């Protein structure tokens, strides 16, 4: 399974299949796999797929952007916190908290406005704070 232990050379195969796939279930699987085997060259396609009309595909793309863990992932995930789909907006916000100070800074900036991003940003920052508080408990 690609998600457990990346297979050397799998990225080109995943990219090729991803470009040909139309079935949302298969597309979701390939998008998820790209997060394990892909790299910076996949940011554009994952950013596009994070706006896919099928929420499962979009969520898989958000998770893959987070898994890549690149600084550019913050820029790709930032606008998704304003998505009209609550699950997607919240998942993007949580991913931003996992991407370190730059991601959290992006969420803190969202709290200042009166946009759809306020709720997911607040949720993710609260969740991150609770997770952090629990780490010190023995």
Image: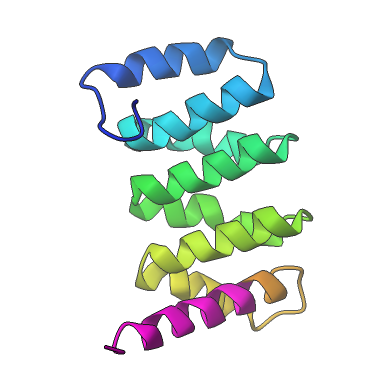
Residue 99: % across, % down? 38, 62
Residue 17 is left or right of residue 98, and the answer is right
Q: Nearer the viewer, residue 57 or 80?
A: 57
Question: Which image quarter is the N terminus in?
Answer: top left
Residue 102: % across, % down? 39, 69
Say if the magenta span includes residue 130. yes
Rendered image quadrant of residue 2: top left
Q: Nearer the viewer, residue 81 or 10?
A: 10
Q: Which residue is at the far left? A: 8
Residue that appears at 59% across and 35% down:
48
Residue 128: % across, % down? 46, 77
Residue 37 is left or right of residue 131, and the answer is left
Rendered image quadrant of residue 4: top left
Q: Is residue 82 above or below residue 125?
A: above
Q: Nearer the viewer, residue 74 or 54?
A: 54
Q: Which residue is at the far front? A: 138
Q: Nearer the viewer, residue 63 or 3?
A: 3
Question: Which image quarter is the C terminus in?
Answer: bottom left
Residue that appears at 77% across and 78% down:
114
Q: Main secondary structure of the magenta part?
A: helix
Residue that appears at 60% across and 14% down:
21
Residue that appears at 20% across and 21% down:
8
Q: Which residues are magenta?
A: 121-138
């Amino acid at each position: 399974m690609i998600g457990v232990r990346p297979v050397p050379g799998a990225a080109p195969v995943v990219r090729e299949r991803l470009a040909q796939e139309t079935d949302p279930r298969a597309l979701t699987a390939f998008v998820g796999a790209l997060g394990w085997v892909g790299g910076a060259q996949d940011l554009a396609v994952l950013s596009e797929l994070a706006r896919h009309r099928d929420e499962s595909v979009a969520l898989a793309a958000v998770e893959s952007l987070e898994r890549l863990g690149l600084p550019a992932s913050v820029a790709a995930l930032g606008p998704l916190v304003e998505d009209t789909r609550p699950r997607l907006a919240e998942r993007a916000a949580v991913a931003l908290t996992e991407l370190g100070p730059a991601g959290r800074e992006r969420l803190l900036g969202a709290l200042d406005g009166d946009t759809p991003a306020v709720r997911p940003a607040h949720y993710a920052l609260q969740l991150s704070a609770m997770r952090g508080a629990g780490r010190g408990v023995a």
